Structure formats: structure tokens, C-alpha cells
Image: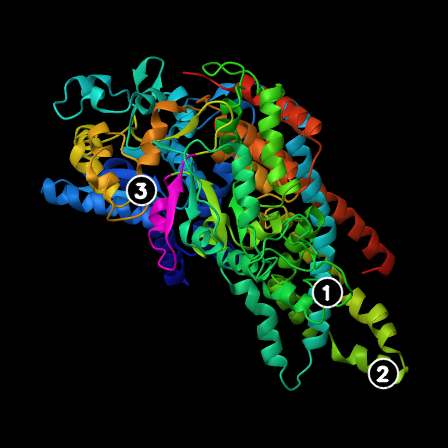
Amino acid sequence: MRPKALVALLLSAVLVLTGCGSGGDDSSGDRGGPVKLLVFGAPEELAAYRTLLDAYGKARPGADVQLIEASDRKDLLARLATSVAGGAPPDLFLMNYRFYGQFAAKGVVEPLDERIAGSDVVDPAAYYPVAMDAFTWGGKQLCLPQNVSSLAVYYNRSLFQRYGVPEPKAGWSWNDLVGTATAMTRDSRGLVIKGTESEGAAQRPVVHGLGVEPSIIRLAPFVWSNGGEIVDDPDKPTRLTLDTPAAREALKNLVDLRQAYGVVPTDEEVEAEDDESRFANGRLAMLMTSRRATTNFRTITGFEWDVAPLPVYQKSVGVLHSDAYCMTRGAKNKDAAWRFLEYAIGEEGQKIIAATGRTVPSHIAVSQSPVFLGPAQPPRSAKVFLDAIPTVRALPTVSTWPEIEDLTYGILENAMHRGDKLDDVVRDLDQQTRPLFARGENG
Amino acid sequence: MSVRPDARSRRQLALMLTPYLVGLVGLVLLPALVTLGLAFTEYDLLRPPTWVGLDNLTALTDDPIFRVALVNSLVFALVAVPLRVLVALGLALLLHRRALGVGSARGAALLPTAVPEIAYGLLWLWLFNPLYGPINQLLRTGGENGLTVLGRTPPQWLTDPTDARAAIILMSLFTMGETFVVLLAARRSLPRDVYEMAALEDATGWDVFRRITLPLMAPVLALLAVRDVVASLHFTFVPAFVVTDGGPPPYSTTYLSLFVYQTGFEYLRYGYAAAATLVMILLTVAAVVVQWRLFRRYRGFYRL
């Protein structure tokens, strides 16, 4: 009997020791270890970051940066928040300005002004101001942007040529977009087909004219272009202002792409195959998305593709898409992290990541160099992204913005695919987001 | 020094239970207590929590998303739990005898439970694909223009609210392997002479089931049903997270578990999420108490 008791005692001792031991390692062993960089992205994007890390390892022998890969944006937010709460945050993380507000407001991000002032690598004047400004909070530069993308229309050039439809070009209007998309929505015989009654209809379109997600960030540039605003005060927003005639018109036109013209795939079709895959598989003539898609689309071999600027209502306006490297306040290797950050957003690092196709470089000189504009890799019209920069506007960075995006997405999705009444949609958008704006903190 | 045997075996028991108790206290009870405490604070994981009293709970009563999640969870439990237990019971009664292929059939019934949850979710994401998924492909055979043979649209698993809820329930039905195994064991341990007696009395199959099998298995069934109700509050999480992402909009398959996850980890409202968790725990307790009373009555009726 005695040995059994001893075994039980031993087992529990082992359990207690291992349980405590692993916790202890996490909190103490980091100092002087590798710089931890938290990112998320598609496999092609992650490969781009690995390329950058490899180059850094070669350029600075002995420097050690470890990539922590989150599966998606939401996973990254959860990991960041829990690691901060647990007292072992990553040293650096890469985040879009639309989502960094909640971390900026809560004092998680280390201000970089002093380090920038003391650096002989990072010169703030060398970067596009619109991207730098998106990451200032309370007058401080919290993060440093790696890219300054905007929304563009990717299009399947081969398909346009096959059907003899003129390719989209700068200065085209919303009506041109609808006309082009209608002309590109085709059935299996290659004939123009109206896609509005596809459910149970004799034929579904095999090629859809356009892919665009019904989200506030896709809607925003058109509201602005039409002379409207999406929030009452961009710096301290308290409500959405989609009830103005200009905003309503832009919203109605977006919804009509599905409801009136049927040029975008139905919700069922989107669930069956998302827009990016649909485009890559040659079944989507145009796709409105940011620069992020480029790394994926560079793997396309079956057809030629290019980018065009957004269509214009009254004036040309784009929406800013920008990700930045942020340092956590609780970072264990701040100096080493800063050295990597200098490299990553400096000329050398930006050239490497730009060559992978992932970014529109935030470094002005790099963005105008052949690494980004060169014709070796698609898109040929990469300059479209640069031409848009003077007109891009940033979305609010209020700390509750992620929640606002999720909530409005549901309402807008039902507007586009279920055909909810526009009055109800505008009212719901306003009423349901007000408490979120009220709860938010601004920089 | 000699110790009395019962005292010694008791001490041994305590020693052997220690590892489990350490885990239970350290990994479950303490975190649960902390979470309950956080339910009365405003906490975003990043700044220290501040005491807000009952604010979170009152805010929950006004929160339309929470109400939808609560109703979704209750409806799921009401529909899925009886179905799961029924399916498991049916399979157990069908497969408890020795016959050709019974072993493989039991294995097949148990297999989906062994698939890791995320993989199981991704598998169903493919099965439910509205256009290319095998389920709808099958339903479309014989029909024309993407309709079923009856001329109806096949279920829109991922885009129609009712169909999506049905999809989550359908997914949950195939993971009743554990319940099935327990019921199988329970059925096989029933005394054989009772059934021989019933056969002598010319009892019909229905009589045997109604008067013998069901009453004898009732305690096990009751226990499994209670367990399933408790588990149903959280096993909706992975399907809703992986397959439907809480949609179709607005919140057709947002269950309490997903609500708690999103509020806590995506929107960093940890205190508020803790309050929702508190409601979940209260619901669990209520479900157990109600069922306990129901089954006590039932046992009284059969004088078990």
C-alpha cells in the first residue's frame, strides 16, 4: 500500500512543479532573448515578412528577431491583449491604424518621438505624412507605418480583352463602373447576362463584373467623393452621418450593385467562393481591394491583371490603408526592437518588403523607385497607388472602431444581399453605433 | 505505528485525488472565481480593473446582441440536446447486440467525436458550401437549374438564418459519440432475465422498450441529458466561430460562448464578458436544478 501512496505524492509533486515551472520561464527568460514581432496575414504575406527577417539577420549578424504568426486580425488582437495582460507582450506588432486605437488609448504602445529624434536612420520627412499622421495619438508618434495603400480596382485584363470591353481608366465615374461591370457579367457561353435573378434562374453568371464587400471602409471613399462624410467629426466622432443625401446616394449605389444590377456575386456565391479566390480563378472581372491582395495575385499564371484607380463621383478621394510597426510599452528588448524597426521601415527594409508586392512603401523615395514601380512584376500600373496618395483620407481611429466595423458590416451585408430598406439601414447604422462611439476614446 | 485500515485507505484516496484537485483548483476554480469577481468591474485586459458594481449586469439586460445570443443558446439547447440524446439512444439500442458489422458501425458512430474540433469545423465548412459542397450537390441531383428534385432551393446553410441554425444543430448531432458509448454500456449491463421474462409474457417490442428498457436506463439518460445541457452552452463555440462566424447577419448563430469570446478578446471588454459568463453559469445551475426536480418526480412515478 505504501508505494502507491508514494507514487501519488510524486505525481502531484511533478504536476505542481511543472505547472509552476512553465509559468516561471515565460516571465523571466525573455530579457536579452529574441525580439518578438507579432503579425498576421495570408501565407504569401507571412512569407514576405520572413524574407525581411532573413535579410535583417544577414545585414546585422547576431540580431535575432522572432516572427509570431497570428491566424487572422482578430486572433492578433486577442493574442496582443492577453499577452499584455499576462505581462509578456511581444516587443513589436504590426497593426492597421483602424485597429490600433484601442491599444493606443490604453497606454499599451510606447511613444517613439524620442527614439525618432535620436535616430540617424529614420527621418520623418522621408515618409508620406498621411500615413505618419494616422499613427499619432495625443500629439505623439506611436507607431511607424510600413505602407500607405489605398483602395484600387484590380481587373482581369485578359478577360476585358477577350470580351472587347474598354479597360477602366483614371477619372472614370460610378456610372462607368456600373456599365463596365454589367458588360463583364457573363454566362458560360460568354454572353452578357443579368445577374439579378440568379437564384433558381435558368443561368447563373459564370463571370461576375465586380467584387466589393459591403463594408463601411469600402463605402467611405465614395461617400467622401460625393461630398458627404461618414462621421460627424473625424477627430472626435460621436455618430455616423450616412443620412445626408450625398452619403445616402453613395450607399444606395453600392447596394444597387447587387439589388438592381446583379453585377456582384450573391451572398451564397461569396460564401461558396470568396471574392479574392473568385478573382484569382478568373471568374471576377474586377475586384475592389487594397494592396494586400497583390502578393496573392502574383501567383496567378492563367491571365494578365492590372489595377485601376477608384471611380469618382465629384472629386477624387481614396481611403487610407496603412499598417505600422508599434512597440509595446512592456517590451523586454526595446533597444533591439528599435534597431529592427529602423531597418524595417528604413530604405533597405522597405525595398525588401516592397519587392514581395505586399506594400505600397510609406518611404517616399522607395515608393518612387523601380522596386515598386518597375515593370518586372504585376501590376503594371502600380503608379495608380501613388497617384491616389495625395487624395487619401483616413478613417477614424476611435478605440471602439473594430466593433463599429463589425456591427456595420452585418447591417450593410443585409442591405446589399437581403435588400433591406434603405431608410431602415441608415437608421440602424446610426442608432446601433451611437453607444459604441460614446464608449470610445479618441487620440 | 499502525494505522487503522479505513483511515489509511482514506488517506491514500486523498493522496491519489491530490493531482486532480490541484488541477481543479488551480486551473478551474480559481480562474472561475477571478472571472466572477471581474464581472463587477470594468476591465479591458490592458489597464487595471475598476469596480463598477452591477453596471455590467444592467447593461447586459439592455444589450440587444446579448439577448439574441441568450435566445440562440436556449433554443439550441432545447432542440439539440433532446435530439442528441435520442440519436445516441437509438444507436445504442440498435447496436448493442452482437451481429455482423456492428463493431464497424459502433466505430463509425464514435468517429466524429474523435476529430479535433477545428478540423471538424473546417470539414463542415466544406460540406455546407452552398454551391460546391457535397450536401447541396446531393440535394440537387435530379433537380434542374440548381434546385432540388422537388423544385425547391436547397438549404442555404451559410446565408439563411434558420438554415444556419439548423446547420449548427446538424453538426452537433454527429458528436454524440460519448453519450452513445455510455448508453451502449448501460444497455449491455441491463439484466438479461428481465427481457426473457418479457418474452415469455409475449410483450411487444414497444412494451419492452416502454416498460423495461426506458425505466432501467432512465437514471443514465437523465445524467447524460443534464450533462449535455451544460455542455451545449459551450460546444456551440467552435462551429459558430469556424463555420458561420456568428452570422448570417445580424447575429443568427451568435451564441453566448461566442458573444463572450468576441466581447472579451476581440473588443477587449473583459469585465462585461465576465458578466455574460456569470449569466451562463447561472443558466447552467438553473438547468441542472430544473432537470433534477423533473427526474426526481419521474423516479417517484416509477418508484425507482
Residue B35 locus on image (x, y percent): 52, 33
- The magenta segment is A291-309
How many numbered discs sit on the rendered protein?
A: 3
Mark 2, Cα crowd under 10 Å, few <14 / some 14-19 / many 20+, is: few
Residue found 63% across the figure and 31% down from its top: A252
Using residue A427 as the reference point, say whether residue B194 is left or right of it.
right
Figure check: B53 above or below A175: above
Upstream in the sequence, badge 2 or badge 1?
1
Asked if the stretch drawn in magenta spans residue A320, the answer is no
Decide: marks 3, 2 in contact (CB < 8 A)? no
The C terminus of chain A, quarter of image? top left
- Disc number lying in front (2 or 1): 1
Q: Which residue position is annotated with label 3?
A: A358
Q: What residue type is labelled 1?
A: Thr
Q: Quadrant of residue A347?
A: top left
Q: Which residue position is annotated with label 1?
A: B148
Residue found 60% across the figure and 61% down from its top: B175
| Residues indicated by labels 3 and 2 sit on the same polypeptide chain | no
Q: Is residue A366 or residue B159 the one in the foreground?
A: A366
Residue A357 locus on image (x, y percent): 29, 44
Decide: marks 2, 1 in contact (CB < 8 A)? no
Mark 1, Cα crowd under 10 Å, few <14 / some 14-19 / many 20+, is: some
Q: Which amino acid does label 3 sit on?
A: Arg
Residue B236 locus on image (x, y percent): 60, 49
- Disc number lying in front (3 or 2): 3
Answer whether residue B55 is visible to the viewer in this image. no
Figure check: B210 above or below B72: below
Give the structural element (helix, strand or loop) at label 3. Answer: loop
